[in-house]
Image (cartoon, rainbow, N blue to C red):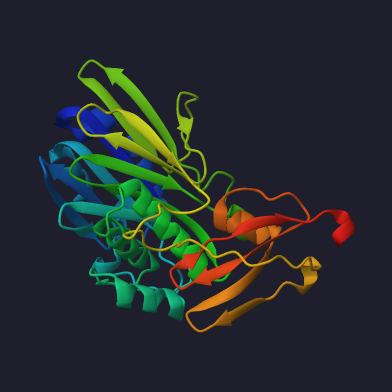
Amino acid sequence: MCRMFGFLTDSPRSVSAAAGQDLRTFHDLGRVHHDGWGIASWDGQKARVHHDPEPVMESASFWPITDALHTDQALFHLRLATEGLAVREENCHPFIEGNVCFAHNGQFDKTPEILSEVAATCDYQPRGTTDSELYFALVLRNHDRGLTWSDAILDAARTILALVPEGRVWALDCMLGTEEAFYAFSLAFPELVPDRPEGYYDLHFLAGEGPEGRSVRISSQGPESPKWRLLSQRTVLRIERGSLALSTTPWRRSGPQGPQSPGVRRTALLPVMLLPAMLLPVIRLGRRGIGLLPGRSWDRLTGHRAAEPAIALGVLHHGGPEVAPVHVGPQHV
């Protein structure tokens, strides 16, 4: 699990001076998140990253590097390594491809299905061993196939939820920076990680104005100021560079449709059989299967709560399921 901090201004300036105490508070979270750190920044359209696998609290370079940063967009990451994953430079976030940088807070199992999906469909192949880099590869793939960055993030999350067993995805919070905008996404299942403090997976953002101009900050730390706003779960926040215009893209039942849409595909619905929820297996037939999902699984895959009792019936495609709820009255069960 990790901590993330994003910072944008309406014109290039000293990041450490402009972010001030918020950045120092973020830095001090390195007392717990001590398995490496990284910074991504943009010089015009050109992105660059600096990684260090050493604890940030022991680093002699964090503040000199940060003090020298003069940019309008930066992304900071502190890593707390998943058990069993190596603490080494190639596993430090943010990851970079071209001028796109990505960081993740959370964890999911690296199942054979998700590994196969990335190997078979993604041009970007991970250089390290983290689940986070698999997530990044799926986002890049989706954008290469014609999706906006917001939809590319959402569809990557759908693919992970489809290919990783329920209960084995803890969180998919992420931040992504490009030449034209910065993106943040929040999706977590905190009930699966009860040892984490309340709000650990929340993302907050703050738009403000000071003597030097306007700025937007977004952070996975717990801001104490009530001026910070909570980013809604299953929502992508987009911050446009320069104008700092804010917009959001909410989770939809299914991904964008069309010939270039990866991940979730349109489902051919089958005639409904009204069955007790306890008798709802998932039958896989090669690369696709017939799925019968209880209401809780419907919530997890779609972000829309199904009335109880309910089942969902549809065809599960290799790229990810798309299902429709079938509400069953108590008299049927």
- 22 shown above or below 28: above
Near-viewer residue (149 or 254): 254
Q: Residue extending furthest right?
A: 331
When asked about the image quadrant of residue 244, the answer is: top left
Q: Residue extending furthest bottom?
A: 286
Q: Position of residue 191 (x, y in %)?
A: 63, 55
Near-viewer residue (59 or 209): 209
Q: Position of residue 22 (x, y in %)?
A: 35, 33
Q: Residue extending furthest front?
A: 271
What's the residue at 56%, 71% (across, down)?
165
- 306 shown above or below 70: below
When asked about the image quadrant of residue 279, the answer is: bottom right
Q: Residue extending furthest top?
A: 211
What's the residue at 24%, 66% (across, down)?
89
What's the residue at 36%, 62% (across, down)?
262
Q: Position of residue 65 (x, y in %)?
A: 16, 46
- 174 shown above or below 282: above
Q: Quadrant of the C terminus?
A: bottom right
What's the residue at 30%, 28% (across, down)?
245
The mark tally for this picture is 0
Q: Is residue 214 left or right of residue 258?
A: left
Q: Is residue 96 left or right of residue 70?
A: right
Q: Quadrant of the N terminus?
A: bottom left
Near-viewer residue (103 or 311): 311
Near-viewer residue (130 or 293): 293
Residue 27 in view (yes/no)? no
